[in-house]
Image (cartoon, rainbow, N blue to C red):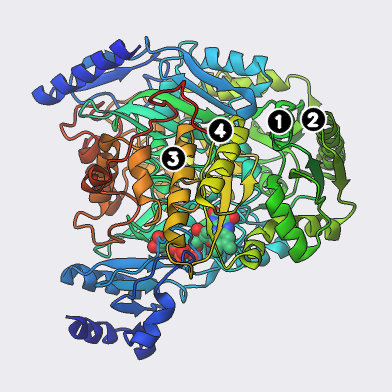
């Protein structure tokens, strides 16, 4: 494996010398996400970087190489009754851990358990100079040095090539049960937030087609007690439903021609955008907008900005539309400064995150 | 220069907000780590963000170092002043700006005390989860700067997991809004980068924290063990059973004795180790979990079990653990608190190593331990008035930290590097890695004016130390006994 890493390092150094961009590729399951590269680039295929390096269930930590598939990791965890609590979407069986970290996408459990970044404990990366670096570690608490590990999450590979990642894992809840209740959107948003403020084992929420889905997770006794308080019907297809939300195989996502992801304050009232249908998650903090036609991005972005959120063009049907919302000038300056430090030649996935670098 | 600066500061700050007389500066010469002291040139006490902006712009223009200070409870010398610099105390920025019970957030100024947030949220059935033992005194701004944890952080996370949004001023007075009211924002995770950055990258002037529901019930099991290894195994067994306790703390024999003499919490004086394990949640859930915890403690060899019957009893049992530091202060004139973290499986080995070092240096050491997440707090007992004892203590402490690195852990779990552990950074990181840390600093503060000389050692310093680099548990001669 070290030979492979040495090869990558030398590829990066050569690319940096010649100012030739590299396109970091794992399983390709999230290739659709983010911006396309600015210029044609040489591929840096990291999918061969596979294997679980260390896993000790009682330490609640797993360390794996970036090219390891999420499926491999989750099946090992499952044998030990543990899980990746942020429920990362795969979008294809080829999904790798590296891609999961680089895109930083979390699934339905995010509002209660935390996001990808909350579970990252340490990384080993190659930076834009081909230097082999380790940050963080395999322990739960570590404040030695700046938190470079979490900085990698969602950076779309623009700050370094991920080699190894250590994650905190959690036990699988004893029982999971889903309730569904009929109500309108405004009520559902209020309801989700109100109950999120009560000490109940709610692990996911979803709202679509005037129906609210609430997943309870924990000991049978706790789930049962919550179920009595919340009411509603028991949904018999709990596992399948949440999987379809996580993997976007739910009809709402499948039938969308273009898909926007709005990250907003959870209590934001229904967002009125003509011609869109919506799927709400995370107690209201995540709003998916599906369109049958291409929508004027400016309007969506403007409305989202006004309510203090951000809009991502998640499934991009028009390459002319920026995928991620631009930060303001002061923040953009910090982004560029950081990029310059990690990747002075600007060769790692240029343009994948923002057109500027 | 200082007179000129004082005049310029007084132009926009009230007279009593600019301190420059020696006796006024004295209280600011150290933080919670009093072994390091330095009188600052000037202390300023701004009352608003815009005043902080002005201070920064002025210092930046004059190229004067700036050190931020919260409540000064830090344990690594992070807020140690700079002799030729301005110390900016954020203590007067202490407004609770907004509590939004439905969205479960609080927006506060950095000088607000950690506990004050939970107190303000309580009427809404909510609280702020990270609970450092210093929570009655430490500021939320300091918590962000150190990524502080508490006894409940295995289940509820550290500061980084419990904040949503920051307003940060860079050294030139520019305002950055980082994070948001939503659960994520596009771009680099600067929220994580700023958290734990020890006041090196910017000054935090506003924090939006998450609030979570106060659990319906909490209950505590105290288990005594005649062998520390068995106590460590009990922790592993509880986790293996799929339980994430709300808190799980361990104390060794000398701590038990010190604490018991001080507080009479009812701990078993014959025990080699005591585990405190808390369960919280719905009444039903807690009843279930406590029963399982009791069973596992017994089968792991606990010699004595006590389960809290009500909240006063639970708090009494906790009080002992929370009083470990003051108890150390009672049995010894001075104590020095270490903060390494290790993979829990190496607990027995590391504790044995500490015991050996304790004999070698002729200094007693109490061990308290956030057992759930492997964060050790050895408290080395010493007397600063005995010549040479502080130096011996520091050498002892340094050895403990190197042992933590060798065990695959880290030199600091929650107290930060500051000035205290700067030498051990040379052991934990390779020069390329330290270089990258300097690069991160450069991205925010190219002239190095914010909190200079802290957190990350210069390569020159590491070279002079000639410290053996113990890389992530890979020992040079793994077969040789070290402990
Ligand atoms: C008895 C005792 C018990 C403790 N228990 C714990 C514990 O259980 N867990 C734990 O994690 N810690 C603990 N600590 C350590 C300490 O309380 C924490 O590190 C705390 O977060 C420091 O907060 P402060 O306001 O006192 O910060 P200070 O000590 O004033 O400053 C700490 C650092 O933060 C920087 N800083 C402060 N405010 C800002 C700001 N607004 N913007 C940018 N930088 C800033 C300073 O420059 C400095 O580097 C304990 C300390 C004591 C004395």
Q: Earlier in the sequence, mark 4 or mark 1?
A: 1
Where residue A327 appears, as percent x and y from the top left, is 32, 47
Q: CA distance from mark 4 to mark 3?
A: 14 Å
Provide the residue designation for mark 3: B402
Question: In the image, what residue occupies the spot 42% across and 16% down?
Answer: A29
Relative to B43, say whether B144 is above or below. Answer: above
Task: Report the side of B176 relative to B300 (left or right).
Answer: left
Q: Chain of mark 3?
A: B
Q: Earlier in the sequence, mark 2 or mark 4?
A: 2
Of marks 2 and 3, the one in the foreground? 3
Query: In the rendered image, which quarter is residue A158 located in?
Result: top left
Where residue B482 appears, as percent x and y from the top left, is 49, 31
Q: Chain of mark 2?
A: B
Would you call the spot at circle 4 few (<14 residues within 10 Å), some (14-19), or many (20 or more)? Answer: many
Residue B233: mark in rendering: 1
Would you call the spot at circle 2 few (<14 residues within 10 Å), some (14-19), or many (20 or more)? Answer: some
Q: Are marks 2 and 3 on the same chain?
A: yes
Question: In the image, what residue occupies the spot 33% across and 36% down?
Answer: B468
Q: Chain of mark 4?
A: B
Where residue A194 appears, as percent x and y from the top left, is 70, 50
Relative to B280, say whether B302 is above or below. Answer: above
Provide the residue designation for mark 2: B300
Instruction: Identify the element where label 1 is drawn.
Output: helix
Task: Depth check: give the residue in front, A88 or A210.
Answer: A88
Are the two marked residues, 1 and 2, in contact with CB atoms closer than 8 angstroms?
Answer: yes
Task: Depth check: give the residue in front, B338 or A213.
Answer: B338
Q: Are marks 4 and 1 on the same chain?
A: yes
Query: In the rendered image, which quarter is residue A41 located in?
Result: top left
Relative to B366, say whether B140 is above or below. Answer: below
Q: CA distance from mark 1 to mark 2?
A: 7 Å
Q: CA distance from mark 4 to mark 1?
A: 13 Å
């Amino acid at each position: 494996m070290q030979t492979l890493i040495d090869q990558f390092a030398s590829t990066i150094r050569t690319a940096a010398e010649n100012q030739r961009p590299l396109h970091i590729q794992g399983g390709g399951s999230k290739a659709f996400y983010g911006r396309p590269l600015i210029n044609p680039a040489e591929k840096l295929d990291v999918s061969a970087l596979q294997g679980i390096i260390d896993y000790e269930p009682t330490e609640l930590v797993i360390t794996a190489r970036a090219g390891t598939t999420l499926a491999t990791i989750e099946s090992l965890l499952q044998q030990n009754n543990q899980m990746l609590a942020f429920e990362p979407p795969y979008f294809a069986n080829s999904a790798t851990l590296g891609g999961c970290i680089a895109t930083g996408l979390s699934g339905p459990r995010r509002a209660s358990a935390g996001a990808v970044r909350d579970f990252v404990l340490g990384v080993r990366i190659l930076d834009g100079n081909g230097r082999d670096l380790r940050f963080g570690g395999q322990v739960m608490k570590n404040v030695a040095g700046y938190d470079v590990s979490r900085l990698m999450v969602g950076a779309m590979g623009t700050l370094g090539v991920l080699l190894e990642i250590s994650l905190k894992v959690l036990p699988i809840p004893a029982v999971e049960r889903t309730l569904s209740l009929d109500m309108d959107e405004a009520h559902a948003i209020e309801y989700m937030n109100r109950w999120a403020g009560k000490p109940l084992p709610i692990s996911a929420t979803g709202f679509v087609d005037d129906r609210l889905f609430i997943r309870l997770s924990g000991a049978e006794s706790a789930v049962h007690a919550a179920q009595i308080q919340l009411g509603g019907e028991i949904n018999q297809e709990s596992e399948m439903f949440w999987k379809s939300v996580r993997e976007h195989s739910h009809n709402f996502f499948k039938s969308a021609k273009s898909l926007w992801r709005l990250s907003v304050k959870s209590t934001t009232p229904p967002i009125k955008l003509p011609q869109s249908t919506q799927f709400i998650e995370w107690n209201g903090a995540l709003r998916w907008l599906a369109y049958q036609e291409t929508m004027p991005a400016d309007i969506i972005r403007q409305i989202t900005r006004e309510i203090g959120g951000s809009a991502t063009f998640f499934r991009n049907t028009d390459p002319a539309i920026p995928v991620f919302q631009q930060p303001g000038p002061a923040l953009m300056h910090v982004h560029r400064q950081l990029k310059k430090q990690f990747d002075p030649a600007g060769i790692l996935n240029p343009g994948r995150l923002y057109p500027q670098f | 220069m200082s007179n000129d600066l004082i005049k310029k500061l007084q132009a926009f700050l009230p007279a009593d907000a600019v301190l420059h007389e020696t006796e006024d500066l004295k209280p600011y010469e150290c933080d919670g780590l009093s072994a390091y002291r330095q009188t600052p040139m000037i202390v300023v006490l701004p009352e608003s963000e815009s005043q902080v902006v002005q201070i920064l712009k002025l210092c930046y223009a004059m190229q004067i170092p700036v050190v931020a200070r919260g409540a000064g409870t830090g344990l690594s010398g992070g807020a140690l002043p700079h002799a030729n610099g301005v110390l900016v105390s954020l203590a007067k920025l202490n407004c609770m700006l907004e509590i939004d019970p439905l969205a479960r957030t609080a927006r506060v100024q950095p000088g607000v005390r950690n506990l004050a947030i939970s107190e303000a949220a309580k009427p809404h059935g909510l609280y702020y989860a990270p609970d450092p033992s210093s929570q009655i005194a430490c500021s939320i701004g300091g918590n962000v700067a150190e990524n502080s944890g508490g006894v409940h952080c295995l289940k509820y996370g550290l500061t980084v997991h419990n904040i949503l949004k920051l307003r940060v001023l860079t050294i030139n007075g520019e305002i950055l809004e980082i994070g948001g009211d939503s659960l994520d924002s596009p771009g680099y995770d600067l929220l994580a980068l700023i958290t734990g950055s020890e006041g090196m990258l910017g000054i935090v002037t506003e924090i939006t924290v998450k609030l979570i529901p106060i659990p319906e019930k909490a209950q505590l099991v105290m288990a005594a063990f005649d062998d520390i290894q068995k106590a460590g195994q009990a922790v592993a067994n509880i986790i293996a059973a799929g339980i994430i306790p709300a808190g799980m703390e361990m104390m060794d024999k000398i701590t038990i004795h010190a604490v018991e003499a001080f507080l009479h919490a009812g701990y078993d004086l014959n025990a080699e180790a005591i585990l405190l394990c808390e369960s919280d949640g719905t009444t039903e859930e807690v009843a279930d979990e406590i029963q399982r915890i009791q069973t596992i403690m017994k089968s792991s060899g606990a010699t004595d079990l006590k389960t809290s019957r009500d909240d006063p009893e639970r708090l009494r049992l906790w009080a002992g653990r929370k009083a470990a530091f003051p108890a150390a202060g009672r049995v010894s004139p001075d104590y020095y608190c270490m903060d390494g973290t290790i993979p829990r499986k190496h607990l027995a080995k590391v504790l044995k190593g500490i015991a050996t070092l304790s004999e070698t240096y002729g200094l007693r050491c109490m061990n308290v331990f956030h057992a759930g997440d492997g964060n050790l707090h050895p408290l080395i007992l010493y007397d600063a008035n005995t010549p040479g004892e502080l130096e011996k203590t520091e050498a002892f402490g340094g050895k403990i930290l190197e042992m933590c690195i060798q065990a695959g852990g880290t030199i600091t779990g929650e107290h930060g590097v500051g000035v205290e552990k700067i030498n051990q950074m040379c052991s934990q990181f390779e020069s390329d890695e330290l270089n990258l840390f300097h690069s991160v600093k450069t991205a925010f503060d190219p002239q190095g004016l914010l909190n200079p000389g802290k957190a990350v050692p210069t390569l020159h310093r590491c070279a002079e130390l000639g410290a053996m680099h113990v890389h992530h548990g890979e020992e040079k001669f793994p077969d040789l006994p070290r402990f």
